[in-house]
Image (tube, helix red, strand yellow):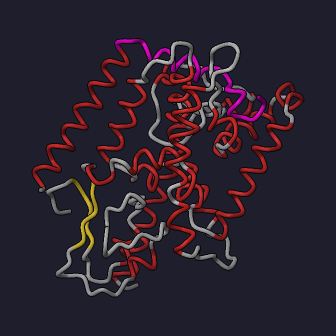
Amino acid sequence: MSGMHRNRLKRLSFQRICQVAFAVLINGYVVGFQKGKIYTGKSKALCVPVLNCYSCPGALGACPIGSLQTVLGARGHHIPFYVLGMLMLVGILIGRAACGLLCPFGLVQDLLHKIPVPKIKVPLKIDKPARYLKYGILLVTVLLLPLFAADKTGIAPPYFCKYICPAGTLEGGIPLLLANETLRRAAGALFTWKLLVLLVIVFASVCIHRPFCRYLCPLGAFYALFQRFSFYQLRLDKEKCVDCKQCERSCPMAVEVTRNINSPECIRCGKCKAVCPVGAISSGKVGRES
Amino acid sequence: MKNKRRVISFGILALSLVLIGIGVGNGEHLEVLQKAVMVCLECIGIG
């Protein structure tokens, strides 16, 4: 086995190990899946750094996007200092590495994309503007609607979770409905809609790499704002670079690695680093070589 | 330029810790806990 190939396998398995380990770590309440109930311990006061529904039977922590909407949409609409602080902390430490290395829904999309069917390369003129959609979703459904569109009780529903979030359907809705007869009987048009959204994203993920992360995820959009300043960065040594573009061809997020290696779209999965034949790409804390 | 970026990074880091501190002081983590320990019917598509 060549050194490069061995290095590639090592990096890919490192990403997969991180993803699986983190998914298990934050969804470790196995009994919940059997009983169709959710965990109610105190660790749920802590926001996890990824999109992981707190109504997943195994979830041990809180979803930051759900929490953000809950606090913003509560009576009185106060500033969600705690949740914003948690999100900013993750953003400034690792940026979108949370998407590439930790997110369970990212792992689901990665695995779906391994299904051997012809892949679609989204044309640049559609892809580039469509990537701004996630910022719109963050602004409108996560921040503005919970603030200004409360119901009669004075409480706003979590609009993103209610109408868009496919992670909630996959991790919370399906397992709970399978195990809980009462919830199954209560499912109606909204569940059908959410299932449809999930199915569209599942089928899109088979052909396009991480479509939800690219175009829709408000959490990825939030972390992207901190990408340029985060302590964990990727670096490209332009003197070593032979401009072979292997990094760009391997990038699941279609980032122009040689032009902007710390692009807000980069999820820091490390695939570019793994395939570089001359070791021109490194990663680590700002100001240090790894 | 690098120094400026570093100052911004440490500034955001400090701000995030301050925000978490204020939030915990206000009991926001308990608000999050209260929501997270109940099945979120909207999240799972019940309504």
Instruction: Label the magenta part by its dominant secondary structure.
Output: helix
A86, A35: nearer the viewer: A86
Please state the horizontal and vertical placement of residue A94, each as a whole percent of the image.
Answer: 33, 48
Question: Is residue B46 covered in magenta?
Answer: yes
Question: Is residue A46 covered in magenta?
Answer: no
Q: Quadrant of residue A168?
A: top right
Instruction: Please state if B42 lies on the left or on the right of A69 as rendered.
Output: right
Please state the horizontal and vertical placement of residue A204, each as a whole percent of the image.
Answer: 68, 64
Which quarter of the rendering shows the N terminus of chain A?
bottom left
Q: Residue at x 81, y 29 (%)?
A: A180
Q: Residue at x 57, y 52 (%)?
A: A216
Q: How many marks?
A: 0
Please state the horizontal and vertical placement of residue A179, each as a whole percent of the image.
Answer: 80, 33
Magenta range: B25-47
A16, A162: nearer the viewer: A162
Which quarter of the rendering shows the C terminus of chain A?
bottom left
**Residue A184 vertical placement versus A152 (above, below):** below
Q: Residue at x 47, y 49 (%)?
A: A220
Q: Residue at x 50, y 18 (%)?
A: A77
Q: Quadrant of residue A152?
A: top right
Q: Quadrant of residue A165?
A: top right
Residue ranking furthest to the front: A148
Please state the horizontal and vertical placement of residue A102, each as a whole percent of the image.
Answer: 46, 49
Residue ranking furthest to the right: A185
**Residue A190 vertical placement versus A183 (above, below):** below
